[in-house]
Image: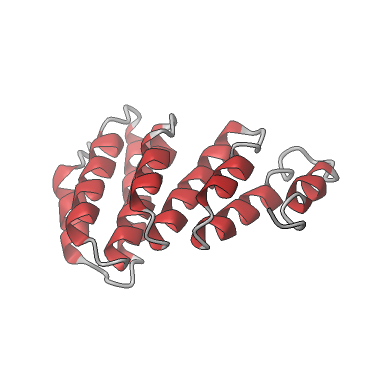
């Protein structure tokens, strides 16, 4: 482990505003995941105290690991997120990363899972917001795969 890794935690500890304390940890976890350093990224992301920020960081870690061609680990992280909003986002980020890594079949399956999670959100406003976020994520893929977006939109229910 490099000497600089503990610094995000020390830096975060010095931030007085608890709402902002997770930002440097989120940033560090995201960068480590994109570099393929999954265990360190997970350790840092799970150290974020705020549950919503932690879920957001884990979603980014999942996407970064998928881009780094560590799809199995990315899927484990994405499916382990409890909050449906962030789980759907993490599945979409993972689908995007898999598509960019050339694993389109797996990406379509993950987009379908994201649709299932988003469709299960009871509050119609939140369901529509997460569906829009997932479509933006999938469209943001370098592949801009219409197959991913079609798989998602075909399955999500927006009432």
Which quadrant holds residue 145? Answer: bottom left
The foreground one among 3 and 51 is 3
Q: Position of residue 154 (x, y in %)?
A: 13, 48
The foreground one among 3 and 157 is 3
The foreground one among 96 and 130 is 96
Q: Residue at x 16, y 61 (%)?
A: 147
Residue at the front extreme of this rendering: 1
Which quadrant holds residue 104? Answer: bottom left
Q: How many dots with numbers?
A: 0
Quarter in which the C terminus is drawn: top left
Q: Position of residue 49 (x, y in %)?
A: 67, 33
Please give left or right for residue 101 compared with residue 50 in the image.
left
Please give left or right for residue 43 compared with residue 137 in the image.
right
Q: Residue at x 32, y 27 (%)?
A: 122
Q: Position of residue 47 (x, y in %)?
A: 65, 37
Q: Position of residue 82 (x, y in %)?
A: 43, 29
**In this figure, which colouring scheme has been used for the structure?**
secondary structure
The foreground one among 53 and 122 is 53
Which quadrant holds residue 130? Answer: top left
Q: Residue at x 27, y 30 (%)?
A: 120
């Amino acid at each position: 482990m490099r000497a600089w890794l503990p610094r995000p935690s020390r830096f975060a500890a010095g931030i007085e505003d608890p709402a902002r304390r997770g930002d440097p940890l989120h940033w560090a976890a995201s960068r480590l995941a994109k570099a393929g350093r999954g265990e360190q990224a997970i350790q840092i992301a799970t150290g974020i105290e705020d549950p919503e920020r932690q879920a957001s960081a884990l979603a980014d870690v999942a996407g970064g690991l998928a881009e780094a061609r560590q799809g199995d680990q990315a899927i484990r992280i994405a499916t382990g997120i409890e909050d449906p909003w962030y789980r759907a986002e993490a599945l979409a980020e993972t689908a995007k990363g898999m598509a960019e890594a050339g694993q389109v079949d797996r990406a379509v399956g993950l987009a379908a899972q994201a649709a299932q999670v988003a469709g299960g959100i009871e509050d119609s406003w939140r369901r529509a917001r997460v569906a829009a976020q997932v479509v933006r994520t999938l469209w943001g893929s370098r592949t801009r795969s219409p197959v991913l977006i079609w798989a998602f939109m075909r399955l999500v229910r927006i009432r």
